[in-house]
Amino acid sequence: MNKKIEVAIFGGGCFWCTEEVFKELNGVISVIPGYAGGNKENPTNNEVCTGTTGYAEVIKVEFDSNQISYEDLLMVFFATHDPTTLNRQGNDLGVQYRSIIIYTSKEQRFKAEAFIKRLNSNEEKQVVTELRPLTKFYPAEEYHHNYYIRNSSQPYCQLVISPKLKKLKEKYFKLLKKVVK
């Protein structure tokens, strides 16, 4: 079967969390933390963290849609962060931590809209995830890449990222990459 490579961009709070979650999924080729949804050329992390650039911390996911569907990515995205809080994830507060989907095609937009509509029909709290088309994506500084792998013993990683990975492994084990021992 030939690969069908697509790109999806998600922001679900701090990109350290979302990067590690999506790297675990079968069919995901690469995950790059970065910034999207804002209005300044070449933003830095320090600028984004001020909340004045309009950018969100996001991940750019390159995936093989013959191995994992965009709907599966949406399912994992919504299950591993709180899409009902505006400009906040846990203790991370500000527009840079908002729940956002940056779609790269009309098909992704329609699928995301339908997914959110289904969630909102079943939940008391409504999803506030922002949807917008991709205009620019800027990769984050190198020290943000593979943050969890390099810093897994840090308190933030232990208290925030590790529980998300545990939930992912328990609830979505069928979507995970197979580990050969």
Image: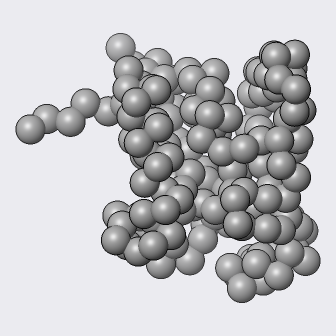
| Depth check, front residue: 159 or 16 | 159
- Most distant residue in the bottom direction: 46
Using the rendered view, name the quadrant where residue 46 is placed: bottom right
Residue 123 appears in the rendering: yes
Which residue corresponds to the image point at 9% horizontal and 38% vertical from the top-left? Answer: 181
Residue 57 seen from this side: no
| Residue at (83, 49) in percent of width and height | 85
Is the residue 68 above or below the residue 130 in the image? above
* Position of 70 relative to 19 (above/below): above
Of residues 99 and 32, the one nearer the viewer is 99
**Image position, residue 50 (x, y; %):** 82, 81
Q: Would residue 10 be found to the left or right of residue 113 on screen?
A: left
Residue visible at 56% across and 77% down in the picture: 141
- Total number of numbered labels? 0
**Can you give x and y, in whole percent of width and height, for residue 78 in the image?**
67, 35
**Residue 129's image quarter?**
top right
Give the quarter of the image for residue 166.
top left
Give the colour scheme of this rendering.
one colour
Residue 4 spot, x, y in % from top left: 50, 25
Question: Which quarter of the rendered picture does the N terminus lie within?
Answer: top left
Q: Is residue 25 left or right of residue 72?
A: left
- Residue drawn at the location 72% of the way across and 57% of the way down: 89
The answer to whether 64 is drawn above or below residue 61 in the figure is above
Q: Please state which of residues 69 and 150 is positioned toward the viewer in this rendering.
A: 150
Residue 178 horizontal/vertical position (percent):
25, 30
Left or right: where 148 falls relative to 55: left
